[in-house]
Amino acid sequence: MSTFQNIITENKEGILTITINRPDKLNALNKNTIEELSTALKTAETNDSVKVIILTGSGQKAFVAGADISEFANYNGEQGKALSADGHVKLFDLLQNLTKPVIAAVNGFALGGGLELAMACHIRIASDNAKMGLPEVSLGVIPGYGGTQRLTQLVGKGKALEMIMTADMITAEDALKWGLVNHVTTQDNLLIKCNEMASKIISRSPSAIASAIRSVNANFQDGVNGFEVEIEEFGKCFVTQDFKEGTTAFLEKRKPKFTGK
Ligand code: COA
């Protein structure tokens, strides 16, 4: 039984769907929601029955319309800094470094912290009504949950600064063109498409996928040589049962049965 107030979790055949459930506030991320997402993700990381995670928002209108503005409107500098630092550790970095794939199903507005949340996921699929943006400078702040970094990594410096400085929302179609999302689909098909991709990923080796996530993430870590991380992770794969199973199944012309060990 889930004890969450702001999110709904459902695990079906290895796919854990986490739905942020504050539709009357367009699923804005308040402190409790961040805590609950953090707890759900940490639990998922160690739960063998979870293979892939889909993160979405409830209702037809929003994925997440940002951090909850009502919570931080009166913060001072110290509190603002702590809000950002805490969010990075508790949720956004946790999400990026999770060794189980996380797909963001962007079903509507993904603004501010909402777009930052989607960008911390490994893959983004958007519905055609989705609108994405980092409107923080219209409130007198900057993106504080990794947006200045992850948007730049995904779309490049010019487009990132354009989005951040104009505070404009872009359409799902533009997000696709710019490489901000992987696919666009109708709202009705969004979770179907995400589940199809999740099912495909589940058929692959979980231990190799974890190695792939660590290697790709190394590309963005200061002072870390991603090629060296790749070499290490590549070597580690050879001692896994998944490697033995994958190569044996290929040679025996059958489908592999991976355990993630
Ligand atoms: N924080 C807190 N509450 C939010 C919110 C946020 N980021 N985004 C939306 N809400 C709340 C609204 O205050 C409103 O609550 P109310 O009914 O109690 O007044 C409710 O969600 C519905 O939003 P509303 O603005 O009435 O919907 P809309 O369709 O007219 O506009 C948006 C939709 C997304 C354009 C608009 O809500 C918006 O600009 N939100 C803020 C986006 C933002 O700046 N995010 C970055 C935060 S750092």
Image (cartoon, rainbow, N blue to C red):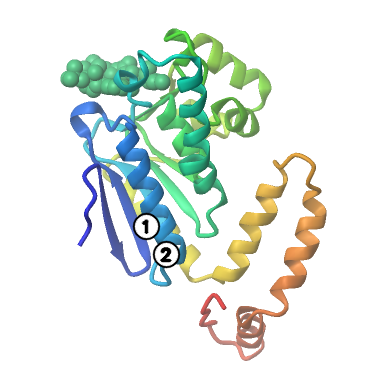
User: In x, y percent, where is residue 247?
Assistant: 67, 82
Position above or below: 167 against 217? above
Q: Amino acid at mark 1?
A: Asn
Q: Tell me the SS state at disc 2.
A: helix
Q: Quadrant of the N terminus?
A: bottom left
Q: Identify which residue is drawn at 41% across, 60% down.
A: 44
Q: Residue 244's image quarter?
A: bottom right
In the rendered image, which residue does mark 1 sit on?
195
**Residue 94 sits above or below residue 10 on the image:** above
Residue ID at (37%, 68%)? 14
Which residue does the image show at 49% across and 26% down from the upper left?
A: 174
The foreground one among 212 and 229 is 229
> Residue 152's quadrant in the figure?
top right
* CB atoms of marks 2 and 1 within 8 Å: yes
Q: In x, y percent, where is residue 226?
A: 77, 50
**Category of crowding for the residue at label 2, using alpha-carbon neighbours closer than 10 angstroms: few (below 14), some (14–19), many (at least 20):** some
Q: Is residue 86 above or below residue 132?
A: below
Q: Quadrant of residue 157?
A: top right
Towards the viewer: 75 or 146: 75
Q: Badge 2 is on which residue?
A: 199
- Residue type at mark 2 is Ser
